[in-house]
Image (tube, rainbow, N blue to C red):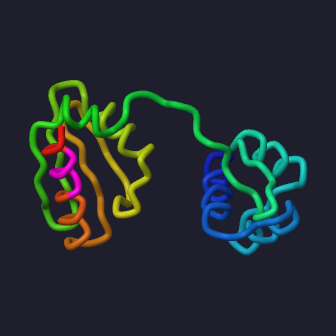
């Protein structure tokens, strides 16, 4: 298992479950087939900026990471179309990666993943209906800009 994969699974666990101790975290990871020593978990917790609260491990408030998605969308998005479970977003040349990164930081639950080229961004939804919801959400943002 790679470090980034393990840390991604840790984030998924603490976002979706109440994990009170490193032992619980280690057990949850073992249940997924991921082994990690206590030292490794401590390092991962520090790297991921997790804090221990009464409710369990939680992420610290994220640091500001750049312009908001809505600002970038208003500036660079030229077109939005659905194609089955995909949403194709056309941007001004050279801006698809920036828009994709901002959208990824928004963590929309409807979006499974993004792929960006130079001027095209592909949003992947689990099904066609969800893709249409994403398209509508994007259009709402563009209309308000």
Residue at left offset 19%, top offset 31%:
76
Image position, residue 109 (x, y; %) = 40, 62
Q: Which image quarter is the C terminus in?
A: top left
Q: Which image quarter is the N terminus in?
A: bottom right
Image position, residue 4 (x, y; %) = 63, 46
Q: Quadrant of residue 121?
A: top left
- In the image, taking residue 69 as reference, residue 92 lies left or right, namely left
- In the image, taking residue 90 as reference, residue 28 lies left or right, namely right
Q: Quadrant of residue 47?
A: top right
Instruction: Verify whether residue 140 appears in magenta.
Output: yes
Residue 4 sits above or below residue 124 on the image: above
Residue at left offset 28%, top offset 39%:
70
Query: Quick one: 120 or 137, which is closer to the camera?
Result: 137
Part of the protein shown in magenta? 137-141
Residue 31 sits above or below residue 134 on the image: below
Q: How many marks?
A: 0
Image position, residue 27 (x, y; %) = 81, 71
Extreme residue in the top direction: 94
Q: Quadrant of residue 18?
A: bottom right
Residue at left offset 83%, top offset 48%:
40
Query: Quick one: 9 or 78, which is closer to the camera?
Result: 78
Residue at left offset 19%, top offset 35%:
74
User: Dominant secondary structure of the magenta stretch?
Assistant: helix
Image position, residue 60 (x, y; %) = 67, 44
- In the image, taking residue 22 as reference, residue 135 lies left or right, namely left
Instruction: Verify whether residue 115 appears in magenta.
Output: no
């Amino acid at each position: 298992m790679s470090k980034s994969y393990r840390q991604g699974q840790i984030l998924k666990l603490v976002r979706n479950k109440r994990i009170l101790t490193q032992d619980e975290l280690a057990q949850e990871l073992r249940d997924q087939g991921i082994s990690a020593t206590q030292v490794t978990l401590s390092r991962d917790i520090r790297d991921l900026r997790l804090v221990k609260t009464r409710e369990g491990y939680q992420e610290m408030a994220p640091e500001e990471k750049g312009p908001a998605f809505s600002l970038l969308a208003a500036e660079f998005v030229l077109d939005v179309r659905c194609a089955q479970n995909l949403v194709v977003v056309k941007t001004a040349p050279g801006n698809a990666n920036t828009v994709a990164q901002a959208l990824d930081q928004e963590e929309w639950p409807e979006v499974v993943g993004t792929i960006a080229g130079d001027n095209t961004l592909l949003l992947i939804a689990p099904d066609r209906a969800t893709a249409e919801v994403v398209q509508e959400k994007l259009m709402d943002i563009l209309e308000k800009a």
